[in-house]
Image (cartoon, grey):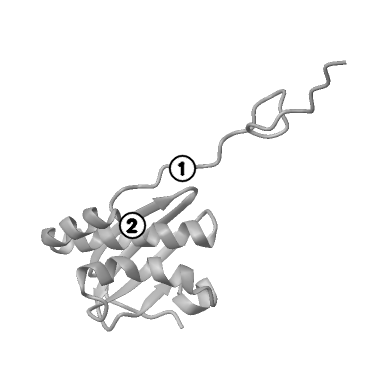
Amino acid sequence: MAATYPQVGTRGTGRRKEAIVRVRLVPGNGQVIINGKSMELYLGNRKALHMPVKQALAAAGVEERYNVLVNATGGGIVGQAFAIRMGVARALSAINPDYEVAMRKEGFMTRDSRVKERKKYGRKKARKRFQFSKR
């Protein structure tokens, strides 16, 4: 089902946690293809993950004008879905600088820097400690 498109279009990169996605916008009818699969097939029936992928296009009002081609690596599907949103927002702002104002207002251009905190020595997890006994 991998669609073949000419190597034209605007590119954008998105990151979230360990997920890194490369997004390419090409003129089309609003199809989203992630790693050669349709969005519904790749993300499953979780509608909460379909929403962030389309949010940037909806904020710019161009849902049906571009096909979104995504190469996603690393992380889980939730991190990838939100990274796709950032990549689409960056690609749209490269197409038209007027879109960037709307993308920044919605917060799509800002990277979410929250990542898992590392485990510390002498503790069970990052913050959890072993049980303390006074006597």
Depth check, front residue: 18 or 118 = 118
35 left or right of 62 in image:
right
**Label 1 crowding class (10 Å Cα cut-off): few <14, some 14-19, many 20+?**
few
Q: Decide if residue 38 is in sight here.
A: no
Q: How far apart are marks 2 and 1 (CA)?
A: 15 Å
Label 2 or label 1, whichever lies nearer to me, is 1
| Disc on res. 60 | none
- At 24% across and 67% down in the image, what residue appears? 59
Residue at far right of view: 135
Q: Report which residue position mark 2 lands on.
A: 86
Depth check, front residue: 1 or 119 = 119
Q: Report which residue position mark 1 lands on.
A: 114
- What SS does tag 2 mark? helix
93 left or right of 5 in image:
left
Depth check, front residue: 10 or 77 = 77
Image quadrant where one finds the C terminus: top right
Residue 16 in percent (x, y) is at 43, 51
Q: Earlier in the sequence, mark 2 or mark 1?
A: 2
Q: Do the residues labelled 2 and 1 touch (CB within 8 Å)?
A: no
Q: Is residue 123 above or below residue 23?
A: above
Q: In this view, does 129 lie above or below 134?
A: below
Residue at far front of view: 135
- At 53% across and 54% down in the image, what residue appears? 75
Asked where in the image residue 130 lies, by quadrant, the reply is top right
Residue 15 in percent (x, y) is at 40, 51
Q: Decide if residue 99 is in sight here.
A: yes
